[in-house]
Amino acid sequence: MRKFILQVHLWVGLTAGAVLAVMGFTGSLYVFQPELTVALYPELYKTSQPDGTPVDVRTIVQNAEQQFGKEVISINFPMRELENYILKVEGNKQWLFFDAGTGRYLGQMENRRGIMDDLLDLHRNLTIGENGVLITRTCALLLAFVLLSSGLYMWWPKKKRNLKDGLRLKPNASFKRRNYDLHNVFGFYFSIPLLLAAITGAYFGFQEKTQQVVDTLTLAKEPTPYVKKLQSAYQAGVPPLDIYQALDRMDQLYPAYKPRTLVLAPDSLATLNLTYLASKELEAGPQYRPMVYLDQYTGGIVYDYNPETAPIGRKLTRNWFVPIHFGELGGWVTRVLWFFLGLMPGTLWITGLLIWTGKKKKNKKRGYSIPGKRVVAL
């Protein structure tokens, strides 16, 4: 049994490990996305009046529509490191930035976060679209349910007196031994954080399926609606809500929360989407993010996710998965930890690869080859 598990661990690690290394490294950088985005694009993200009261969003909308001659269809409100408004107008794919302190137009970018969106694209789907999503999320599931479990099985010593060796780096060790210890020791200590990051990461790629599993495990009385399939009741000849009516509706719902995004329906059947945040600043713990999907013709609620009253399965994925995956659960402490966590898949892949190649060379010198014998790879 041990030899079989070893082979599974080896070959899954050698293949999926390369993808996980890329995902981990890009994820490490993306942990500090808000701060890096501001540092890269301060002229767009920093307001000219940081201590002043933000200009009313309707004034921003008016300025945008006057300047570009088109209706505003999407709004991102100031929050966290973003101090300004970001809008989109009909027929323009660029993100438009407006100073929250003065209402002045600042400029535009194709990506809302500039190069950081390219980094996210590489992290999520390897820049190859839906096929990339399938690859990255499958690798995340392999990490969670194959590599970590098989790695811990092989890490566990046959004799209790050898347990201490698996918990520390051996001093004054050779390169070969140090590499082996790095793989085993780091793999053990980071196993639980890696498991959490992998499961929550898979959720973002297989959201509907993951939510179904969570709902089943938490004995939900009814399934969670898949928001991408929600629709408005089409009414011929009835105009959809415009941006100002949508803002009025947004003000009526969740007045104790901060507005985060408003997106008008992109076609005649889609819903109008509103999202909120409990706080504009980064806070440790779960993140309460109400999400409301409205009928674009009547303004009636099609689906309302209330983070305080929702079933436990929805609370788990909506309130907890985001801060867990991005390392925000414990504030700055876990963000720093998650930065190093992102380096672990690459570290384990490289050290595992070195262990494997070392064993191959050793067996070749002996005149025979047993592929992967006693090799531990990510």
Image (cartoon, rainbow, N blue to C red):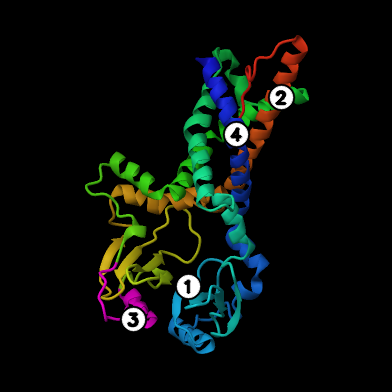
Tag 2, which secondary structure? helix
Comparing labels 4 and 3, the label whose residue is closer to the camera? 4
Q: Position of residue 305 (x, y in %)?
A: 32, 60
Return the residue found at the far bottom.
66
Q: Amino acid at mark 4?
A: Thr
Quarter placement of the C terminus: top right
Disc 4 from disc 2: Cα separation: 15 Å
**Residue labelled with disc 2:** 357
Q: Which mark is residue 15?
A: 4
Disc 1 from disc 4: Cα separation: 42 Å
Disc 3 from disc 1: Cα separation: 17 Å
Q: Are marks 4 and 2 in contact (CB under 8 Å)?
A: no
Disc 2 from disc 3: Cα separation: 64 Å
Report the front residue among 31 and 201.
201
Comparing labels 1 and 2, the label whose residue is closer to the camera? 2
Up-down: is 188 above or below 80? Answer: above
Disc 4 from disc 3: Cα separation: 52 Å
Range covered by the magenta-colored residues: 232-252
Q: Amino acid at mark 1?
A: Phe
Q: Amino acid at mark 2?
A: Thr
Tag 4, which secondary structure? helix
**Residue labelled with disc 1:** 77
Return the disc, 4 or 3, that comes first in the chain's sequence.
4
